[in-house]
Amino acid sequence: MKLLSVTVPCFNSQDYMRHCIETLLPGGEEVEILIVDDGSQDGTAAIADEFQEKYPGIVRAIHQENAGHGGAVMKGLSQATGLYFKVVDSDDWVDPQVLKNLLDLLRRFHRENTGVDMVVSDFVYDKLGAIHKKVMRYPHAIPTGRVLHWEDVGNFAKGRYLLMHSVIYRTQLLRESGLDLPSHTFYVDNLFVYVPMARVRTLYYVDQVFYHYFIGREDQSVQEQVMIRRINQQLRVNWLMFEQVDLDKVENRRLRRYLLSYLEIVTTISCVLLFRSGTPEHLAMERSFWKDMARDYPRHYQLLSSRFFGRVLSSRTALARHFTLLVYGISQKVFGFN
């Protein structure tokens, strides 16, 4: 039986995927490593096949025509046999000892028939050249050492939200959530976290750094200038978040409040990128974004425009843009992203 399925989406990843996979192998036979070669044009496919041949029963190489990050994640999910599911990008890596600790926990859940929906752990922004690397921890909001319900969860500080790097989902919950990441679209990480979380009833927090999120490649999708060039994809994900989760149908008040905060952050990022570009086209897109939201998703508009950043952004003044960019610049320095 596989406790954990790990999907590793790979596109032209020959230069760094080995390190990623090697940090997952200490999980042994209880881990299923699904290397999804997403139509790569370099040596990625051969490396995936090499690992499959060397570690049969642990590694599976899956080859498909290019479908983008979301398509690769969905392919992995469709093939997964583990009780729990994790995505590890091919330029990132995990801590092997913490992996073993997490497997001990998942094994206990299975033995005790404790169907925990989501396991949370810490991650680090492993920024190239940075002396001090920012660790994202959640002990201020999530108690440790016991199975929790949302009533047990406190308030998350601004900038400390649960990202894809933080979460392991129960596989069946992912499938039942209706998660459907679009192909050929970047920034679907937000959908991967947001959509299934609306169904999470129980969670468990492990206050250990499991995931190393590498930042430093010039072509990386989260580099600011790359995100601006791909702003239509960021906006598409934002719209899909409106479409796929009806916040009024989320019964738990604390969970609904958390999801709204998460949506506010993603919406703020969309607007900040348009502001940072500053072109007439992008400033017009930002104005249209709020008008279209008010027309097509009036409830989301009402909720977001009543919150702090929503009030600032929806005012659409030069002062609002200046203030938002100032906060964004401070956040870059504090959290070490982009």
Image (cartoon, rainbow, N blue to C red):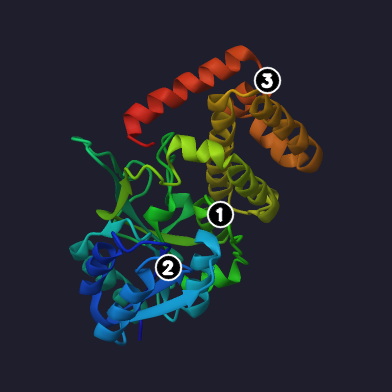
Q: Please name the amino acid that badge 2 sits on.
A: Val
Sequence order check, earlier mark of 3 and 1: 1
The tag on residue 191 is: 1
- The residue to which callout 2 is attached is 116
Which residue occupies the foreground of this view, 222 or 64?
A: 64
- The residue to which callout 3 is attached is 315
If the image is split into quadrants, where does the C terminus sit?
top left
213 up-or-down from 223: above or below: below
* The quarter of the displayed image where residue 184 is located: bottom right
Do labels 2 and 1 touch, CB within 8 Å?
A: no
37 up-or-down from 16: above or below: below
Which residue occupies the foreground of this view, 34 or 300?
A: 34
Sequence order check, earlier mark of 2 and 1: 2
Sequence order check, earlier mark of 3 and 2: 2
Do labels 3 and 2 touch, CB within 8 Å?
A: no
The local secondary structure at tag 2 comes to: loop
Packing grade of label 2 (10 A; few <14, some 14-19, many >=20) is: many
The local secondary structure at tag 1 comes to: helix
Q: Please name the amino acid that badge 1 sits on.
A: Leu
Residue 336: x percent and y percent?
Answer: 32, 34
Distance (Cα) linking label 3 and label 1: 27 Å
Q: Please name the amino acid that badge 3 sits on.
A: Ser
Which residue occupies the foreground of this view, 49 or 328?
A: 49
